[in-house]
Image: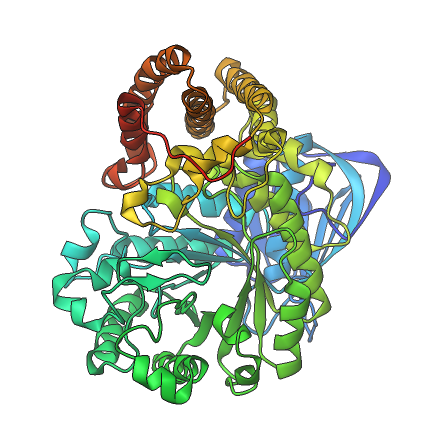
Amino acid sequence: MNLVPYPRSLRRRSGFFNLPREGAIHFHDRAELSVALRLQEAFRRAGSNLTITAGTVVPANAAVVCQSRSGASIHPSLYELAIRKSGVLIRYTRTEDFTQDGLRAAIATLRQLLRDFGRRLPCLEIQDHADFPRRGVMLDISRGRVPRLETLLGLVDKLADLKINEFQLYTEHTFAYSKYEQVWEPWGAITGEEILKLDARCRELGIDLVPNQNSFGHLRPWLEHRPLRHLAETHEPWPLPWGDKVRWPFTIAPQHPGTMKFLRSLYDELLPYFSSRFFNIGCDETWDLGSGQSAALCRRLGKGEVYLRFLLQLHKEVIRRGKTMMFWGDIVLQYPELIRRLPKQRLCALNWGYEADHPFEKEAAQFERAGIPFYVCPGTSTWMTLIGRLDNAEANLVNAADSGLKHGATGFLITDWGDGGHPQPVAVSYFPYAIGAGLSWCLKSFRLEAVRPMLARDVFENRKIASAAEQLGYVHQTLGYPAFNCTPIGAALAAPPPSMGEMWCKDGLKYYAQIDPEKLGTTLEQIEEAHAWIARAQPASPDAAILADELKLAARMAAASCRYMLWQQHLSAGKHARADSIARKGIKELQQIESDFENYWPLRNKVTPKKCSPFLRWRIDDYRKRRLLKPARSL
């Protein structure tokens, strides 16, 4: 059975239950209307018109009976689902806060069974509950791609059927703050009204929409805004941990008297739109701390101490607003002696890491020993790839689930970043979303082989498109050159000109010299083959058609990246005639991609793609000027 997440216990019984054309869904307790309607809609799609009833008297025509069990349970998501020849029985735990997590989980499983089998359901017994109480997805909306409300509503609807119960929108500057339109207007922003609508829909789906506003590092758009320039740690060039220098502001000065006033104003405007009791304040990667305004303070107290004191200030602000503070745990992990000084209440550390071999085991153990509530936060591995990096994503997600489960993590957050302008579409992320959802529900029962057929049925609505999406996620392996936190396919096309001093895709213009030309040609063929599969497929709905168009566009960009690297190789070898031929075709190809990208953009996103796709113009300029970066080493 193609179920994701796969139940921890499923026993197939002989026979089938044939759903009646007419009947009832009966709830012993009063169910939330949204829960009942979601189940009713699934039966309607399967061809069965079931009315909703409730109370102690079960009607004779009840096809589905939902029974709650009171009492404490260590697993709020616990449910039992029995399909018998006489009907369907759901038993679930009724929690004190009436969240009905078990009922929602049972309904998510039943909805998948209905899509798989229609009105003829196989008899079976399921006993199930989640490994991690909170299972989330975080989507970056701050790097160039701000989704439309309709896009987000469609996404959370699909995530609910994967038993995801938390959703975050990573925000640096793309909430429509009333006083700062100049900051967010060029990028687009999500409005308070849209958050209210999204929050309401998430509550109906049993998903906690957690507010997210980075509050320490990653504040460049704010700190380049003239009225806020004085709050920057520094405007001078500063070094990254690996040696490169950055020439723009990044971190807010923690000791400046205007810093807390500014952050309070953001919190006071943002938080009233969310019903969640959590608030993610970010505070990761404060690399330039101590390089400017706080230099003397950091020399006197130490960077770790300065960081912790500011974090504790923010914690007080979050508590005053009735929230539990979430924050990225990377900085305190660099100063293990500070972890024990973190508050044990109303705080949650987010332990992130995105490579297959990230040391989740070591880091999770540190939070466990200190008694600090924490999540494990792996990633989709889609950013700076265009078409994905599924092998790394799977290993990273498994690693996080295993370590988090072993050390008592309360949550599992799948992070979907947009570094490099966020050119990759959400269609590329569904495979890691599904894998992460399955692993976070039950690591032991997870079945990777169920993911592709489930996505073919429920998301892409076409087997060829799902197969092509999966193939695209693995083609980078053919290059034989693994790159850190990206793929050569994504980084070569999206690499900024060196003169910009950007940190993302920074080595992309050098990768061509490390890749065998034959392997590059084979990779290009594989991408074109997957594109052809998608182009020939017939999606079953308008939503699936948009996903197919997204994948086609991503595949075309990936193919253009391979051709660009081939051009670099010919130019480097002095084969100018061949290089010029590739360049002429490449310019036309990129111009057409840019036109198609602009036409597709408003179907999913706000404003324009100008912040998302400038690399198309950069590569056209490279072609025209025969501009080639010569790395120190080459093949």
Q: Position of residue 102 (x, y in %)?
A: 64, 59
Which residue is outermost to the right?
14
Vertical relation: 218 (above or below) 458 = below
Vertical relation: 55 (above or below) 11 = below
- Foreground: 198 or 352? 352
Is 600 on the left or on the right of 633, as rendered?
left
Vertical relation: 203 (above or below) 460 = below
Residue 51 can be seen, yes or no: no
Is 575 on the left or on the right of 464, as rendered?
left
Q: Position of residue 219 (x, y in %)?
A: 29, 62
Q: Position of residue 418 (x, y in %)?
A: 41, 47
Which residue is outermost to the left?
227
Residue sitting at 27 percent across and 59 percent down? 220
Q: Quadrant of residue 14?
A: top right
Q: Quadrant of residue 262?
A: bottom left
How was this image coloured? rainbow
- Foreground: 19 or 570? 570
Q: Position of residue 242 (x, y in %)?
A: 46, 59
Residue sitting at 19 percent across and 60 percent down? 224
* Image quadrant occupied by the C terminus: top right
Is 612 on the left or on the right of 123, as rendered?
left
Residue 39 can be seen, yes or no: yes
Residue sitting at 70 percent across and 72 percent down? 73
- Foreground: 338 or 600? 338
**Number of marks drawn:** 0
- Foreground: 336 or 443? 336
* Image quadrant occupied by the N terminus: top right
Is 278 on the left or on the right of 351, as rendered?
left
